Image: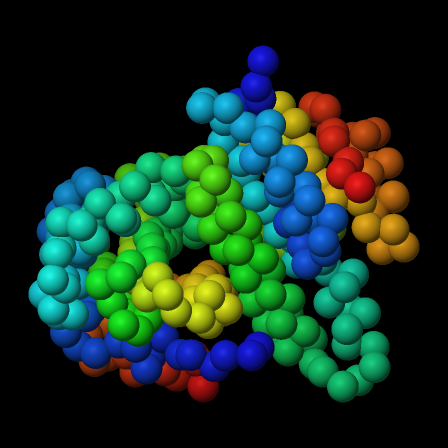
Amino acid sequence: MKPKNILLYVDASKESRAALDVAVDYSGPETTIIAVNVVNRQTVIQLTRSGEISLAEAEVELEENGWCYLYDAEEIAKSAGASIVILQESGYPEEVLPRLASEYGVDLIIIGHTPGLGQASLAQQLIEHAPCAVLVVK
Amino acid sequence: MMNELKLSNLLTPKNILLDVKEKEKDALLAKIIKTFSEVNNIADPEALAREVTEREALGNTGIGRGIGFPHAKSSQVEEISVLLARPARPIEYGALDGLPVNLVILIIAPDSGDNNQYLHAMARISRLLGKSEVREKLAQVKTPQEAIDTIAAFEN
């Protein structure tokens, strides 16, 4: 049985792109992919540590880049005939994704696994706290 | 960002509709596409309407916070073109967050154009209209030129 709602975590990584391909493959006629980009508060703070950019500039950069990834994902999914909606949230992915999964009745969360970028920790936390199945794409 | 395409540079008083009276999403989109087609001398408005609605059918373009953002690529435009509409009353749009929309912006890009420029234009617009202070100001403007000036002020 195909999932009804897939929550797809979208970022800049090639693993995220691989996760999108899996989400499209897992989609059936009644499936909606809910693609979410999270403007990670921790990354915002990290970007400002060098002092080269301000907090506001870091937020602008991450927000605009995030929307680009989302519209790119939307383009790819719709071109493949998959149903997709996009949204951007601010916060921490390990908190945002389980909350959205509950709010939107998600059957399956799909994330890409990016070694060395804390994704192992994200995957672990999602497995612990998500209200549904979690698929990690390598 | 690699492209500094600004919404205020794409807008003219002709491609801004304030207090649109249509009460339902489909009628609103039809009105927007009709006006867009007139302003941009679109050769086949019905084909453009199909391109937009077919994309819409594959995923609602309500991006939350009261914004509808229908978009498509089309061979009928030679450059990225937009139309901004403010409904007279909030319209049920089927957005994921459940909020009715107060602002709708249609963006059409050439199908053979620079995809990065298209993505960045949509990203910039999404971020801009995602700000509550921008939406609040646009809810109060009385003329299309005031809307352009408001957007330009936030973009600059």
Q: Position of residue B26 (x, y in %)?
A: 20, 41
Q: How is the image coloured?
A: rainbow
**In which quadrant will I find the N terminus of chain B?**
bottom right
Which residue is at the front of the view, B152 or B3? B3
Q: Position of residue B10 (x, y in %)?
A: 30, 77
Tell me, yes or no, if residue A71 can be seen here. Answer: yes
Task: Please name the residue shown 22% across and 45% down the image.
Answer: B50
Residue A52 pos. (x, y %): 76, 86
Residue A108 image point, x, y percent: 65, 27
Depicted B108 relative to depicted A101: above or below: below
Tag count? 0
Whether residue A117 sits left or right of residue A17 in the image: it is right
Residue B17 visible, this angle: no
Which residue lies most toward the top here? A1
> Splitting the image into 4 quarters, where does residue B154 fall?
bottom left
Residue under the image location 58 percent in, 22 percent down:
A3
The outermost residue toward the front is B112
Assign the C terminus of chain B to one quadrant of the image. Answer: bottom left
- Most foreground residue, B119 or B97: B119
Identified at 33% across, 43% down, the residue is B56
**Which quadrant holds residue B152?**
bottom left
- Residue A28 in the figure: left or right of residue A47: left
In the depicted structure, whether residue A101 falls above or below residue A90: above
| Residue at the image point whose x is 39% and y is 69% from the top | B113
Along the viewing direction, whichever of B103 and B137 lies nearer the viewer = B103
